[in-house]
Image (spheres, grey):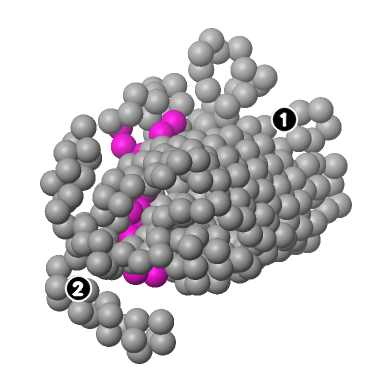
Amino acid sequence: MLFLGLSMQVTAQIDSTRVFVHDGYIEKMRDYIAIENSVNNDYEIFELKNNGTELQIAPNIGTNYRIQVNYKFILAGFQFAPKLFPDNRDNDTKGETNSFNFKVKMVFDHFYHIAQYSKNQGYYLKNSADYTNIDNGYIIFPDLHYQAIELESGYIHNSKFSYRSITSHMERQIKSAGTFIPILKLRFYNLDDRSSSINTQKTNNIEFTLGPGYAYNFVIAKNFYSTIGGLVSLGNIHTKLTTRLENEAAVSYQNNLLIQWQGKIGLGYNGRKFYSGAFATLSETNYNQEHTTATNFETRVFFNFFVGFRIKPPKFIQKNADKIESKLGF
């Protein structure tokens, strides 16, 4: 209700003379700021199978909150897991997790680029019942740290497909269209057990994937749309494993073939002043550890619910943004 009220307040600020249609397929609204709030269950987990045993290590996070500001060709936002949500409060049995994510995304006519930083501290063993007889109890890892820097670039082949309409919401798709999107991803991350100076491990990983993707925006009615998409990627993950021993550290290396696939479906409302929607993503990552019988895998279902509204930016912000765009040749 709060965001509906805010969207009603900015009704008069949407100037139709500053909105134009490109090629009959896309309505551009890049002279406005889009402020977006969302909740999701997107967080990193680690799953391992080896000789009939399985480990499922996860942070004690149920729901994330993200706030994001979109303007022109750039969007930026941060995400955390507030205790406001009941499924983030079960610290007594699953331990406490501190989580933070910051993301910047630039979207141009054909290319997009993403850079994000993630950090988590505190995990627990989801399948603790396989290893302990304690009822409703979990094995916790309060000193397990995860940090990651992720980079992603994609090429939007069809100029009639509006990638901004489903990401930065600086556009509206007014006629259905689809496109191929080859995507390149790089991820640098480490997982570090800091519970002790000996008999603990740290992994440093460099992950690279490349693959073809496809997305389609189906315009159901004037302001309603549905989106489907898919991606299949192959790549490599290079791992440096450090085991801390009493006198020295043992170091080993691995290079593993990485296979990923992802499917996404969404439904949304995209008006000129107010927009909202929900997306579901099914993804899987799989690789076999070199020189071992262990397999790392992750199969997840993500949900994302968002609501946002557009406002006219202050004149000084718009003036400086226009100067930057002019210098960059946009």
Is 110 or 251 nearer to us in this picture?
110
- Residue 240 is situated, as x and y percent measured from the top left of the image, at 68, 61
Q: Residue at x 57, y 40 (%)?
A: 265
81 falls in the magenta region: yes
Q: Is residue 79 magenta?
A: yes
Corner quadrant of residue 164: bottom left
Mark 2 residue type:
Ile
Relative to 88, 301 lies left or right? right
Q: Mark 1 — residue?
A: 54
From the viewer's side, name the closer residue of 61 and 176: 176
Q: Which residues are magenta?
A: 62-83
Mark 1 and mark 2 lie on one chain; the one further toward the N terminus is 1
Residue at image location 54% in from the left, 26% down from the top: 139
Report which residue position mark 2 lands on.
317
Quadrant of the drawing holding the N terminus = top left
Asked which quadrant contains residue 106, the reply is bottom left
Q: Residue furthest front?
A: 24
- Which amino acid type is shown beneath numbered disc 1? Glu
As helix, strand or loop, the secondary structure at mark 1 comes to strand
Residue at screen point 71% across, 47% down: 261
Helix, strand or loop at mark 2? helix
Q: Main secondary structure of the magenta part?
A: strand
